[in-house]
Image (tube, rainbow, N blue to C red):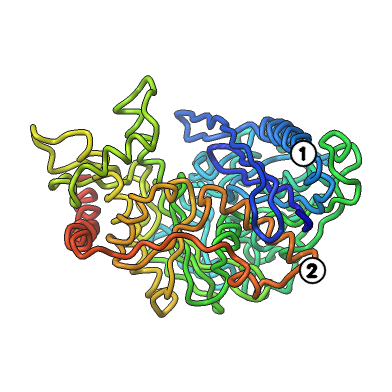
């Protein structure tokens, strides 16, 4: 090993992954940890941000001690993870209260009081103002930073009084390493408070702030995407075993890290993330919004381009849920489940599953949608039910893919899969069949975002350019559609819009 190494961190909703990754994309070692989300009957969904930081420090210490040669060559720290969540911190970057995650809806009524109205739930002039400037609009249920910025002062005034900055998780961790408060157009995308028509303007938009009735006084200063924020604090470098010269790169959302990790950083190539949630994205040169299908663009990777953003609230989490139902005491691995699913025929013997276990956002935003099994009989076995879950999630992705490709104006020439669900060759094949498209399973798909952050560090340090990634990337395994799989899943995909409408009619 002769190249630079990055301490890469991916703070997913389920917990952090921490890895040592060379800037050209070789994952030397990594750890995966879990954290708990605390849900309340009032719509609260919180995590302990201080616990994230303790877990990450411990994991980094262990990894760096285990690989002293890599530790000596670690030139950068780069952080990705969940977004549209809010960590209140004091002037030193210490949390003053729990993190309100992207699932927390306590501020919904306050958002609706500001911008609610008759057009898709919005006041027309207000929503048009947001869409025109930021490319999206605040969640009417409060599940984003606007709901948090309104909700925390209203429900926890003592937290607000102690808070200097309201930060996204990746920016909180960046400050924990450097002591410097910062954010980017990308990390703040979920707040919809910057004018993304002008990515060279590093300010929050006064019109949008006024619309929602908040000040930018407690919002961290904006800097360019991919900038070096500063060196690691001496006390942290000493504790972890990092070189004193190690720098920290701006944090970016997992969407951006996935694009970097899959090297889908040029137009025409898409990536499909099959993680706790799921999404499909690619690069586009234009700011655009499809409010009817909850698809928009957000600031991209170059401070001049954009990434397509959308979200399906239940991705690979559906298989985790089914495992907890079939094996409540544990005892079955995900490999066990997918091996059993492989014994069922394509189409799952007529068993169908809709994966809306937590509602849905794209291509139909309806937080009241719920998952269903149908076509069950006395002959239905566990293999058919597990395969139906895999096929239902894939069909949902195929439904979204059609809308995403219409949004960007052309089919993706390649579709690369990342995320924990993409570890399964069976699920990759089912996805190829459902989408009727060749898909590539990127190497080590569960840690693709760690690889992406190491790439970002290499770019920030001038080791190579963003345009080099497609050639630099590690090639994966290709899965081509099978005629029998396409035929079995085509009706499953086609039935989803009507199933969603039927669910609404029943309400």
Query: 10 Å neighbourhood of mark 2: few (<14), some, or many (≥20)?
Result: few
Query: 10 Å neighbourhood of mark 1: few (<14), some, or many (≥20)?
Result: many
Q: Position of residue 440 (x, y in %)?
A: 43, 62
Quarter-of-image position of residue 488: bottom left
For this rendering, which residue is in front, 444 or 367?
Answer: 444
Quick one: which residue is furthest to the front in this view? 1
For this rendering, which residue is in front, 11 or 469?
Answer: 469
Residue at 29 percent of width and 64 percent of height: 481
> Which quadrant is the C terminus positioned in?
top left
Distance between mark 2 and mark 1 Cα atoms: 24 Å
Q: Position of residue 353 (x, y in %)?
A: 24, 45
Residue at 48 percent of width and 60 percent of height: 476
Quick one: which residue is furthest to the top in this view? 329
Q: Secondary structure at mark 2?
A: loop
User: Left or right: 4 with respect to 370?
Assistant: right
Q: Position of residue 224 (x, y in %)?
A: 75, 66
Q: Which residue is under mark 2?
A: 462
Residue 399 shows up from this direction: yes
For residue 64, the mark is 1
- On screen, 44 above or below 208? above
For this rendering, which residue is in front, 56 or 506?
Answer: 56
């Amino acid at each position: 090993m002769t190249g630079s190494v990055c301490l890469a961190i991916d703070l997913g909703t389920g917990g952090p992954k921490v890895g040592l990754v060379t800037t050209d994309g070789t994952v030397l070692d990594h750890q995966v940890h879990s954290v708990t989300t605390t849900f309340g009957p009032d719509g609260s969904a919180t995590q302990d941000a201080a616990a994230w930081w303790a877990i990450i420090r411990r994991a980094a210490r262990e990894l760096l001690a285990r690989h002293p040669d890599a530790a000596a060559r670690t030139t950068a720290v780069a952080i990705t993870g969940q977004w549209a969540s809010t960590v209140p911190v004091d002037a030193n970057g210490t949390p003053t209260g729990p993190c309100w995650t992207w699932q927390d809806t306590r501020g919904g009524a306050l958002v609706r009081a500001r911008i609610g109205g008759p057009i898709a739930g919005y006041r027309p002039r207000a929503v048009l103002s947001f869409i025109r400037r930021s490319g999206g609009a605040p969640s009417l249920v409060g599940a984003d930073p606007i709901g948090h910025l309104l909700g925390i002062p209203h429900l926890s005034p003592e937290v607000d009084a102690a808070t200097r900055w309201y930060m996204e998780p990746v920016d909180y961790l960046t400050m924990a390493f450097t002591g410097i408060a910062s954010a980017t157009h990308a990390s703040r995308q979920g707040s919809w408070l910057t004018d993304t028509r002008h990515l060279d303007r590093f300010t929050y938009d006064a019109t949008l702030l006024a619309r929602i009735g908040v000040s930018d006084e407690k919002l961290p200063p904006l800097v360019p995407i991919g900038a070096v924020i500063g060196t690691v604090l001496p006390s942290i470098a000493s504790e972890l075993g990092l070189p004193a010269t190690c720098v920290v790169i701006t944090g970016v959302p997992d969407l951006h890290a996935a694009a970097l990790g899959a090297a889908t950083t040029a137009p025409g190539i898409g990536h499909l993330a099959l993680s706790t949630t799921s999404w499909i994205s690619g690069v586009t040169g234009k700011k655009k919004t499809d409010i009817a299908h909850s698809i928009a663009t957000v600031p991209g990777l170059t401070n001049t381009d954009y990434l397509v953003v959308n979200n399906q609230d239940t991705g690979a989490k559906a298989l985790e849920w089914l495992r907890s139902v079939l094996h409540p005491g544990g005892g079955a691995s995900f490999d066990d489940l997918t091996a059993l699913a492989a014994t069922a025929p394509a189409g799952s013997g007529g068993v169908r599953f809709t994966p809306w276990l937590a509602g849905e956002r794209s291509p139909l935003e309806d937080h009241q949608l719920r998952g269903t099994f149908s076509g069950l009989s006395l002959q239905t076995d566990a293999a058919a039910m597990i395969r139906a879950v895999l096929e239902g999630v894939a069909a949902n992705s195929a439904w979204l893919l059609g809308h995403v490709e219409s949004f960007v104006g052309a089919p993706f020439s390649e579709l690369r899969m990342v995320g924990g669900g993409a570890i399964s060759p069976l699920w990759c094949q089912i996805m190829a069949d459902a989408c009727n498209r060749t898909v590539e399973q990127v190497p080590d798909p569960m840690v693709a975002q760690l690889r992406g952050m190491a790439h970002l560090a290499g770019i920030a340090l001038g080791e190579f350019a963003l345009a080099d990634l497609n050639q630099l990337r590690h090639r994966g395994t290709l899965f081509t559609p099978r005629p029998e799989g396409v035929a079995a899943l085509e009706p499953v995909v086609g039935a989803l819009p009507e199933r969603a409408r039927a669910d609404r009619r029943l309400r």
